Amino acid sequence: MAITGVDRLMQATSFHGNLPLVRRLEAVGFRAWPAASVVYDGSWQVRLTGGHPSKRLNCVVPLDPSDYHDAEMRIEKARKRFEHYGRPLLVRETPLTPQPLLGRLAQSGWEPFETVQVMTADLTALELPDTLDHIPSHDVGRFIDVLLAVQGDDLSLKPALAEILTAIRPTTGFFTSEHATDGPLAAALCVQDNDLAGILSFAVLEGRRRQGIGTEMLSAALRWARISGARSSWLQVNGDNAAAIALYRKFGFRKAYHYRYWRQKDSTV
């Protein structure tokens, strides 16, 4: 039998993982970065946030490898919801995504883009300093100011970020680094969900990278998480961010699985 282009794409998109672990990390990830609107269509989670463009907050996430019936109708139903929010429809592919659904997307002119690694580390075996170089804060507004400055993001995102961060239910620690002259240098959010701690919104000012600031911030966040009872940590990082991946690997993080987004080929995302 000849192998078609779609067959090759299906082979390329087929990736394996520890599905119970994937399900747990997906669940804690949703709680750590909550969307404003979450509805379910079967096992498909439809996530939308009108005030913030983050792809994680605006996508369809299938969560059962066997749930792909009536796919075309459900995709169109989701598209209408996304149009109502003024968002392009995105599907996030994880090891839980039904492979037949990906085949149908490919046949309908969709394409995958932006691969993200989900990495985990054992905090119980990690050597960390006994003291915290940076003390976590609960000042959401100050954290957002530092994060936006470090990332160079539009200040108009502040209200949406405030809504997202205040909606996080698990315990949070906001870490920032500022210099009296240079201003904001780095920011990191640590979300402790029972024995799991997630590192999110971790950013270092571009001109101050590779100077040890990121190592200090990550050490402080992980130390705080371990003191608070976490035994494992997780994070998400773009697959092409070699510098960040190298830093995380020094802290014992290893890839658990990856995910990526799908869009229609004429999309401007």
Image (cartoon, rainbow, N blue to C red):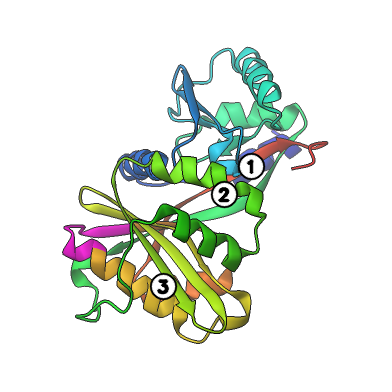
User: Residue 147: horizontal and vertical position, in percent?
Assistant: 53, 62
Q: Is residue 240 visible?
A: no
- Viewport quadrant of the N terminus: top right
Asked whether the residues under the numbered discs 3 and 2 touch, taking CB atoms below 8 Å apart as contact, a structural biologist would say no
Asked whether the residues under the numbered discs 1 and 3 touch, taking CB atoms below 8 Å apart as contact, a structural biologist would say no
Compared to 70, does 235 lie above or below? below
Neighbour tally class for label 1: few under 14, some 14-19, many 20 plus, Cα within 10 Å: some
Does the segment drawn in magenta span residue 185? no
User: Residue 38: horizontal and vertical position, in percent?
Assistant: 47, 26
**Is label 1 or label 3 in front?**
1
Looking at the image, the residue that sits furthest to the bottom is 211
Which of the two discs, 1 and 2, labels the residue nearer the N terminus? 1
Which of the two discs, 1 and 3, labels the residue nearer the N terminus? 1
**Is label 1 or label 2 in front?**
2
Q: Which disc is residue 53 wearing?
A: 1
Residue positioned 79% across, 37% down in the render: 267
Q: Secondary structure at mark 3?
A: helix
Amino acid on which disc 3 is placed: Arg
Q: Which residues are magenta?
A: 225-233
**Mark-to-mark CA distance, 3 and 2:** 31 Å
Q: Is residue 98 visible?
A: yes
**Mark-to-mark CA distance, 1 and 2:** 12 Å
Amino acid on which disc 1 is placed: Pro
- Viewport quadrant of the C terminus: top right
Left or right: where 260 falls relative to 166: right
User: Residue 96: horizontal and vertical position, in percent?
Assistant: 45, 35
Left or right: where 15 falls relative to 241: left
Q: Which disc is residue 249 wearing?
A: 3
User: Residue 85: horizontal and vertical position, in percent?
Assistant: 66, 26
